[in-house]
Image: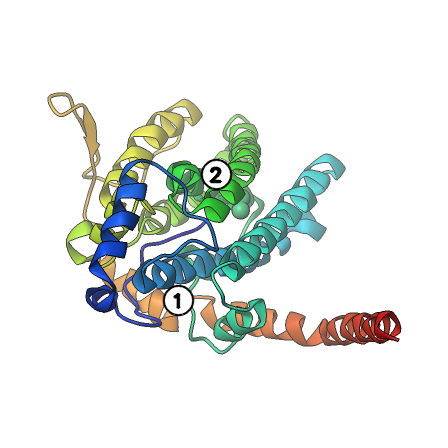
Amino acid sequence: MYTQGLNEQTGRPVAAEATEDEARLRAFQARIDAEEKIEPKDWMPDAYRQTLIRQISQHAHSEIVGMLPEGNWITRAPSLMRKSILIAKVQDEGGHGAYLYSAAETLGVSRAELIDQLLSGRAKYSSIFNYPTLSWADVGAIGWLVDGAAIMNQIPLCRCSYGPYARAMIRICKEESFHQRQGYDIMLKLARGTAAQRRMAQDALDRWWWPSLMMFGPPDAASMHTAHSVRWKIKRFTNDELRQKFVDFTVPQAKFLGLNVPDPALRWDAEAGMHRYGEIDWTEFNQVLKGHGPCNRERLAERRAAHEDGRWVREAAAAHAAKHGARAAA
Ligand SMILES: [Fe+2]
Ligand SMILES: [Fe+2]
């Protein structure tokens, strides 16, 4: 994951486009409407650039912070096979972060600047990674639900109007699909296991269901970025549309597992051809976004420590590059 369509503003406000040259704006929109890809050196409205920097960097941060809750279980995975799968998955997430920082850099922002925004707490990442992983079943629930929600969000991004982001998403989506399946496989094993294992799987679903629905971001009525992002074909579906697809896709999977979705209001609406679900606790969502979720402080502290631990590597690489640069110039 994990773009969340959040409301915070960074950079110039979207209204700044009003000052852009009208003819160029029209030509730009015509290219978007014709499904052409916008490439880094092409002219683009400043608000388009800022929206993409915000979204891609938030997505990159989410991939990197998302390594932490699952990384927590690598040493405790129940078998060698599960351990190797989990290591591969966590490594994939690191790779997703790397592609996405590179895609953001094509828009004229440096990776160092973006990482500084994350570590200083100015940038957001997906709210979901501020919840703890209390049992092995949580690793299953994350793969099934969190990576599942990520796929729902990200498949339309493969057709995003910005070329570097769209191309990065194609490979990422292939890997997310493996992540989702490995998570569901863990849930299936637990759901068909002992009574204690079934309880563990149900408990994980109980704790991860609602935060997974929150991953799609605020409701459309409260999402200030949606209209522009849809017009620019950065987003193809609104937050609520994607959330609905996720519910419709996931509820039958929960039934197959024999687990109960923790929502007493959940019902199939045959007339509308969709599931109706209960009210999401947006107060909890906003609290987590403001930094008051169960693990916000812990996650940022871990990222800061990892950044410090890697300082010598960055310094050594910079010294090596400078030495070779000086040699080449001589
Ligand atoms: Fe990922
Ligand atoms: Fe993933």
Q: Secondary structure at mark 2?
A: helix
Q: Is residue 301 above or below residue 272?
A: below
Q: Nearer the viewer, residue 155 or 210?
A: 155
In screen coordinates, is 215 left or right of 107?
A: left
Mark in the foreground, 2 or 1? 1
Q: Secondary structure at mark 1?
A: loop
Residue on which the image places disc 2: 201
Few, some or many C-alpha atoms within 10 Å of disc 2 (few <14, some 14-19, many ≥20)?
many
- Res 322 → quadrant: bottom right
- Res 272 → quadrant: top left
Residue 18, image x and y in percent? 19, 65
Q: Is residue 202 visible?
A: no
**In which quadrant will I find the C terminus?**
bottom right
Residue 11, image x and y in percent? 35, 72
Cα separation between marks 2 and 1: 23 Å
Residue 293 is tagged as: 1
Residue 216, image x and y in percent? 32, 48
Residue type of the residue flagged with mark 2:
Ala
